[in-house]
């Protein structure tokens, strides 16, 4: 009788699904004829003043370890920045902040800090798959509450969410503005969610990396509503941020966490055992980025709004396309009638149309048949060219033969 070989890794890790986005992108990597809109980043390089700050730091020989929680000058710059945005009643001090090696690292650190194996975690989906995968890596029992599309606009069923969050729920994971749908919580909804989570003793892990990429005019601070606007400093709330999107710094891997003061020193220990610290020259670049926010971020947001307002009407004019303009983020999330398998459709669009999009199945099962188009393009003409390729392909493939 053969004895089964035990798994050589934790089963939770072996059970993780590979990225559906990468699955599609790998089919088109290296092809110069493909218009690639599959990854969540702009094709604009980081502003020169930020790049030069890193160069200057390296030339000074600043290539050594820093404090686990980050350089004091960067933590202070983040404190000033966050206080300007969300410190209407009290400052968001450095004692609540940790610098991380990217937003992904910040999210994983938060998961490690909050989630034990067997804990119940609720996530609002569709969502970037890393957020739910990290909970699964920690051995959580994951429950998903889905947004629902209405005329192409994804909306939250608040009653369903509150029903899912009980005293047994350790953590709620929510991303707003949302990747991929562009859905954005209102301040009233955030207050209602936070009040409910206080009553159940549930932590809120809020991914707010897209908060500055917000195109509505209903906030005085020029960004999306934040849980920090309605929370008390010691609430069970951890907010994740990144330099990637609003500072055009995706490849730099620099982010930060906002958390209750009592949590911060313990987060420093977790950082030590994960990455030790973010690189000094990267942090020095982050300081300069924050000091030049007024010159960098408004231009980035204005350009992305122009990208959205270029792409969305063109897509809405395509027969069989369902979508609504995103309130925030950098994505058009749309459905193609008659093409229910978005993974197969995305692969065919790469191979046959030279158009690279991300499949909805990457973000949640309920997003099957949807496609995500990152509209963060330096050249608006690329967006129009991509729509023409999609229209041509649809004329040749009008139904579900995918």
Image (cartoon, grey):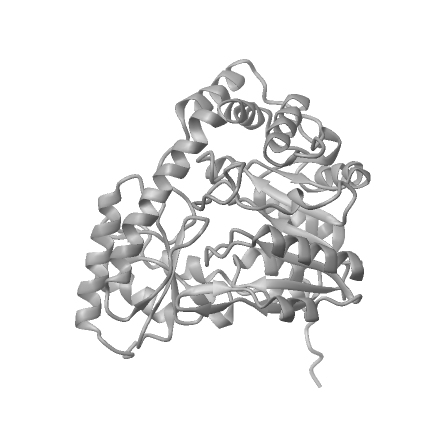
Seen at 69% across and 70% down, the residue is 164
Seen at 68% across and 42% down, the residue is 274
Q: Is residue 376 visible?
A: yes
352 lies left or right of 8: left
Which quarter of the figure has residue 297? top left
Seen at 54% across and 36% down, the residue is 221
Q: Nearer the viewer, residue 159 or 211?
A: 159
State the image coordinates of residue 36 (x, y, percent, origin top left): 31, 51
State the image coordinates of residue 215 (x, y, percent, origin top left): 43, 45
Q: Is residue 128 above or below residue 245?
A: below
186 lies left or right of 154: right
**Quadrant where the image shows the C terminus:** bottom left
Q: Nearer the viewer, residue 378 or 64?
A: 378
Q: Nearer the viewer, residue 400 or 259?
A: 259
Q: Is residue 300 above or below residue 346?
A: above
Q: Nearer the viewer, residue 264 or 59?
A: 264
Which quarter of the figure has residue 350? bottom left
**Quadrant where the image shows the N terminus:** bottom right
State the image coordinates of residue 282 (x, y, percent, origin top left): 54, 28
Q: Is residue 26 above or below residue 46?
A: below
Residue furthest to the bottom in view is 1
Q: Is residue 8 visible?
A: no
């Amino acid at each position: 009788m053969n004895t089964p070989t035990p798994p050589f890794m934790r089963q939770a890790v072996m059970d993780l699904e590979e990225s559906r986005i990468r699955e599609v992108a790998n089919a088109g990597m290296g092809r110069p004829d493909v218009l690639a809109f599959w990854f969540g980043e702009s094709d604009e390089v980081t502003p020169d003043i930020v790049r030069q700050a890193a160069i200057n730091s390296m030339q000074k020989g600043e290539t050594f370890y820093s404090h686990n929680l980050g350089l004091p000058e960067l933590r202070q710059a983040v404190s000033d920045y966050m206080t300007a945005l969300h410190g209407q009643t009290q400052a968001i001090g450095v004692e609540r902040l940790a610098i991380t090696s990217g937003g992904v690292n910040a999210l994983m650190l938060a998961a490690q800090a909050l989630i034990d194996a067997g804990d119940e975690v609720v996530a609002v989906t569709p969502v970037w798959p890393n957020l739910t995968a990290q909970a699964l890596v920690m051995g959580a029992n994951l429950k998903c509450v889905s947004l629902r599309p209405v005329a192409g606009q994804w909306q939250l069923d608040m009653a369903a969410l509150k029903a899912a969050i009980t005293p047994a729920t350790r953590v709620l994971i929510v991303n707003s503005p949302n990747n991929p749908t562009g859905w954005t919580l209102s301040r009233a909804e955030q207050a209602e969610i936070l009040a409910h989570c206080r009553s159940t003793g549930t932590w809120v892990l809020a991914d707010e990396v897209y908060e500055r990429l917000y195109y509505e005019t209903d906030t005085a601070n020029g960004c999306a509503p934040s849980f920090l606007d309605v929370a008390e400093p010691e609430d069970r709330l951890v907010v994740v941020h990144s330099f990637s999107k609003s500072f055009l710094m995706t490849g730099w891997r620099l982010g930060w966490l906002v958390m209750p003061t009592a949590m911060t020193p313990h987060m420093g220990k977790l950082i030590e055992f994960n990455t030790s610290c973010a690189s000094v020259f990267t942090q020095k670049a982050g300081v300069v980025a924050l000091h030049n926010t007024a010159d960098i971020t408004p231009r980035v947001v204005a350009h992305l709004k122009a990208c959205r307002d270029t792409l969305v009407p063109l897509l809405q004019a395509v027969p069989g396309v369902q979508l609504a303009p995103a309130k925030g983020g950098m994505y058009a999330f749309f459905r193609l009638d008659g093409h229910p398998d978005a993974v197969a459709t995305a692969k065919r669009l790469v191979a046959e149309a030279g158009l690279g999009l991300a499949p909805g199945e990457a973000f949640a099962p309920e997003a099957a048949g949807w496609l995500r188009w990152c509209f963060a393009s330096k050249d608006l003409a690329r967006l129009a060219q991509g729509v023409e390729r999609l229209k041509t392909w649809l004329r040749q493939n009008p139904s579900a033969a995918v």
